[in-house]
Amino acid sequence: MSGRRQTNILPVDAAKLGKLLLSDSSESLLDEWDIELDDSSPDAANMRHAAFQLQSTDVPVAFPTETVYGLGADATRSSAVQGIYQAKQRPFDNPLIVHISSLKQLRSLLQPNGSHNKRSTDAANAESTPNGNHDDPIPSIYKPLIRKFWPGPLTIILPNPKDSVLAPEVTAGLNTFGARMPGSLLALVLIKLAGIPLAAPSANASTKPSPTAAEHVKYDLNGRIDTIIDGGPCDVGVESTVVDGLSYPPSILRPGGISMEQLRQCPGWENAIVGYRDASEKGTKPRAPGMKYRHYSPKATVVLYEADAMPPSASALLARIQDHQRVGIIRTSTWSTACGLSVVTSTEQETPNDGTPKVSTDGQMSHASEPQLEVANGSTAPFQRPMSARPGFLNLVQSFALHIIPTVHRVSVQVGETGAIADIWEINLGRDTQDIARGLFSALRQLDREDVDVIFVEGIQDGEGGVAAAVMNRLRKAAEVKVRD
């Protein structure tokens, strides 16, 4: 992968790919599913094109997941995985997460190289190994989590077998690897079409805020990759929860979309502990992505105010303005507009939260249509169970929900007694934790584009290992200044 490349954004609506085929006898979407692509659909053609690139080149492909956009490459080929590190300019000792589309594919990765055909892992003739089978290579500690949270924002740490089929660059020298089944139909279809597991970190330049929209990927990686699959804004907005069940007690290595409370409700995870710190763990060998290096950082200086801290004073903001600094503010639950400065004008308008269609910052509707579904054997008979009762299905269709993409507003404020006017750039993420998570990275990126010098951020209350903890974990790693009281 050399020279500047032509980076193209390929729009794909999952509802226009074709038909999702589900077995009526299957207990979940974890194994028994397929896709019948519509040959007349440009969306299906874009997916085939991306899958072919993953199979035949060493240039990674950016694609949407329910968490953030990923940068994927064939996890079994060293040259392809090296393309990820080169495109992101990522340190080689930072391990990658492997994304799979079925449990059959995962089981094949847990077998020594040579016991299977790596190019046909998803089409293996062997039947799925029952959960209770003692020969199942998937550790039993993870079975309750897989059934409850996959497909979804959960990564599990697994033993990497001797003579592993995985490229050594995936594990960064560890004897384990992280794997997850993404809760995004587009991601699952891409993996299935390619017929290979995908190593995929977030599709951003290393250390920068993670991308939650295709335009974020283009901003960071333009000229470094060829293809970005545009599936609209991401549903969760922060990366997956990473858990380690190979040690006791089991632990969370990175907070994300699954909370500690949810994990502790699963058998074997009642005593799960926090195994991460809200700071870069330099001088250590990272057991999971996001543990060692500074992450999620915009160009501007981030000043994080913890949830119980007083907001920045008017004098503190005025001092920045009078020092000719461009000021950005990210509000959540309690801060007032411009943090108490005298507002002259503001472009902010109340955003409807009544189910009306939400649009992105570029005027495009967020994807909301759902895929067609039919019984895999071709029968016209209805499913014996409602789809909402099928494990994994609700996780998948959540990615089709409409979400607001936060918008930056210019607020003109009065500076001192002279009557001079200055501008502040402000984003209000609202009180809802899920909305804050979805909008956080986008907000940091938008304020960076306004060339602000400093970003004051209103933190939120966080518990152990939930989405709120993930938000604050990312902010604490991004912040150069933390205000606690």
Image (cartoon, rainbow, N blue to C red):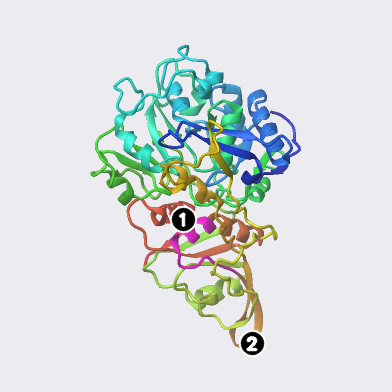
Distance, label 2 to label 1, CA atoms, is: 36 Å
Residue 198 picture quarter: top right
Q: Is residue 378 left or right of residue 37?
A: left
Asked if the residue at tag 1 contacts the one at tag 2, i.e. Cβ–Cβ closer than 8 Å, the answer is no
Image coordinates of residue 476 in percent, x first then y, are: 43, 55
Mark nearer the N terminus (2 vs 1): 2
Where the C terminus falls, by quadrant?
Answer: bottom left
Q: Secondary structure at mark 1?
A: helix
Q: Amino acid at mark 2?
A: Thr
Residue 271 picture quarter: top left
Question: Who's the residue at 31% across and 23% down the image?
Answer: 133
Q: Is residue 423 magenta?
A: no
Where the N terminus falls, by quadrant?
Answer: top right
Q: Amino acid at mark 1?
A: Leu
Total labels: the figure holds 2
> What mark, if any, has residue 418 been given in the picture?
2
Image coordinates of residue 63 in percent, x first then y, are: 61, 40
Image coordinates of residue 355 in percent, x first then y, are: 55, 66
- For disc 1, the neighbor class at 10 Å (few under 14, some 14 to 19, many from 20) is many
Q: Is residue 172 in sight in this rendering?
A: no
Q: Which residue is mark 1?
A: 475
Q: Is residue 473 left or right of residue 328?
A: left
Q: Is residue 110 in sight in this rendering?
A: yes
Residues 366 and 212: in front is: 366
Image coordinates of residue 21 in percent, x first then y, are: 55, 35
Q: Secondary structure at mark 2?
A: helix
Q: Which residues are magenta?
A: 426-440
Question: Who's the residue at 70% across and 61% down the image?
Answer: 363
Marks 2 and 1: which is nearer the front?
Answer: 1
> What mark, if any, has residue 374 been given in the picture?
none
Query: Relative to residue 385, is residue 80 depicted above or below?
Result: above
- For disc 2, the neighbor class at 10 Å (few under 14, some 14 to 19, many from 20) is few
